[in-house]
Every structure is written in C-alpha cells, then in structure tokens.
Image (tube, helix red, strand yellow):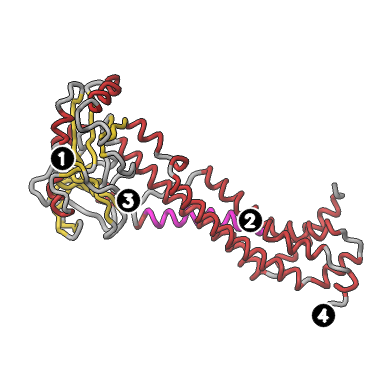
Amino acid sequence: MEPRGVQDTLNKLVVGNLLHRPLRTLISMFAVAMEIIMILSIVAIMIGMLNGNKTRTSGVGMDMFVRPTGTTMFNGVGGAPAPIRIADILRRQPHVKVVAPVIIQLTSASALENIYGIDYASYDALRPFIFISGGPFQGPYDVIVDDYFARADKGHHVGETINIIKHDFRICGIVEHGKGGRKFIPIDTLGQLTGSEGKASVFYLKSDNPANLPLIRSEIESVPGLKGSYEVQTLDEWLSVMTPEHLPAFTAGLDTVIGIAVVIGFLVIFQSMYTAVMERTREIGILKSLGASKAYIVNVVLRETALISVAGIMLGVVLTFAIRTGVQHRFPTLDFLITPGWILRGAVIAFIGAMLGAAYPALKAARKDPIDALAYE
C-alpha cells in the first residue's frame, strides 16, 4: 500500500490533469452519461411496456384464456385468426362462468398501442369497468378510454371525437386504467375495420372456482376440434413466461442496445485518454525520471478515467430521470420503468467499458522511455 503522502500527491495530480483540460473531461463525462442514458432509457421503455402489459392483462379479471395454437404470447401481434363462434362452445363447459371474445389490434398511427375490440357485456362481466365519466357503448363507433389516455396531450373528454384506425370514434366513457387496453371499441366494429369479421384474437375465461382450472382445461381439450388447434393457458402460467429470460428476441434487443452503448463509451474514452497520454509525454517523462514506477503511471491514467466515469454515471442517471419526467408528461400512457437493479447494472457496464477503453493508453504511457519522453516536442 502506498504511503498517504504519495496517495495525496497522486490524487492532486489526477484532479489537476482533469481540470487542466476541462473540455476533454466534459466530453468524456457526457460520453459515459450518454452510455448510461441509452442503456437505462431503452431498458426502461422495453421492460416498462412488458410489465405494463402484464399488469393491465392481470386487471382484466380472467382466470385463463384460449387462443389458436402457434399464435404469439404477445397480445395484438397475432391478429384475429379464431372464429368467434368458439365462444359458444367454451360457454357450454360446466365450470366456465364467463367467456369474452376479444380482438386485440396493434396499431402505430399516433403511438404504439393495442386497440381492444370487445363484446361489452361479456368483457365487463369478467371484472366490471369503473367509470369516471360517461358510460358503455351507445353506437358502433363509440370508444371507451382509460384515465391515462384521457389525461394525455391536452386532455380528452366524453363526447370528443378521436381517430382510431383511420376512422372517427366518439368517446362515450372514461374508465379507471388497468383493464387490458387503453382504448376499447365494439368487437364487430374492429372486425370490420381490420377485415376480421366474425373473428377473435383470444377468448378470456372466468371460472366458477379457481380450483376448477385444471378441470376446465381438460374439458376444453376433450372437445373435438379444439385439442391441438387451441392452446389453453391460465393467467398465472402466462405471467410466469412474460419475463425477459423467456423472451429471446427481447433479450437480444437489450443486448444489442447495451453493446452499442458500450462500444460508444469505449471508443470515446479510448480516444480521450490516448490523446491525453500523447499530449502529456514530457510530463510522463518527468515523472519517470523522478522515479515514478510503471504502476504509478498506469494508476494516474486509470484514476482519471475512474473519476470521469463516476461523474458521467451520476450525470447519466440524473438525465435519465429528467428524460422520464419529460416523456411521462408528454406521453402519460407510455410505461417508462427505471429500476435500481438496472441503474446498478448500467453503472457497472459503463464503468468497466470506460476502464477497458483507458487500459491501452495507460499501458502505453507506462512503457514510455523517460529519455525519449523528455526529448519529445
């Protein structure tokens, strides 16, 4: 362990070097901050959307659902391939209390969102809507929206006309959020607009008793024509697989973004510290002529990088929270979830990337011959 006096001298040298080149220091800090912002923002949006989807689906009030085999587990991505008459078959099962056919249509007109086409009576029977204002559908081109959407932009109100899938709809009711989607229109209307008349994406089921779910599954699978063609899954089973670990594409997307962020941070730190080493060749020669070891020179460069990284990480976290505030104000329906775990993970990734970027410049500085360094112009 180095004496305290040597440590104090080393720290003063590190701080002095950073303050002597404020522009380069700031650029390096912002590079690390941008790395943190990229990681946390993309993760916050992707995980926020995943968790938001899970929370809203849990709030529908179903115990299980039936969907065509081979369709995606993501709501809205698979279209509406199932005949709606399957609902009548499911209703005849002795332990099924409610069957609600639903079309879930993914749209990206104004924002990436799922539009729910519902049969109001059966969907409401799963877990009744809680109306804040207005009421159920009065016509085929009425829409029910949740309170999050109602607060979006400059606010929306009952009686207002909004555009959905290139057609005007009248807001007939505003409900509390958390019941599947944010916009609900009659299933027949959505079927006509998407060319899916008489079809559904999924059938939500409510049992007479949760203990009967295994029995309901076996009863449905014993119906001729359903086994092998339709998948029966409980809500708990669906929730258990809706995690990044079970979604390869989701994980690959996160890894790609993190990889790009790390490369950016690595290159900027590498360029910054390499240039700094070249500019301080004579300074390094003086230090080595005074007896500074290779380890001491490496320590100087790596400590500078560590200090820049810590400052950049803190700046990146603060700016990410600022971005979240702005995004949620502008897009209140967008789930933007920043978790402590990902803050720590992002900080570790950014710090290691920066230290790796500084490793070669540090070693190059340590290997400089003091005679050559003193003669450097």
Residue tagged 1? 84
Residue tagged 4? 377
Query: How far apart in space, not on screen, are marks 4 and 1 (Cα)?
Result: 82 Å
Side of 38 where 305 appears, left or right: right
Q: Position of residue 277 (x, y in %)?
A: 75, 68
* Mark 3 surroundings: few (<14), some (14-19) or many (≥20) residues within 10 A: many
Query: How far apart in space, not on screen, are marks 1 and 2 (Cα)?
Result: 53 Å
Query: How far apart in space, not on screen, are marks 4 and 2 (Cα)?
Result: 32 Å
Name the quadrant containing residue 176. Answer: top left
Residue for point 27% across, 55% down: 107
Residue 271 belongs to the span the image colors magenta: no
Q: Secondary structure at mark 4?
A: loop
Q: Secondary structure at mark 1?
A: loop
Residue for point 15% across, 40% down: 84
Kind of residue indicated by mark 1: Ile
Residue tagged 2? 353
Identify the mark at residue 271; answer none if there is no mark. none
Q: Nearer the viewer, mark 4 or mark 1?
A: 1
Q: Secondary structure at mark 3?
A: loop
Residue tagged 3? 333
Kind of residue indicated by mark 2: Gly
Residue range (magenta): 307-328
Residue 189 or residue 92, whichever sits in front: 92
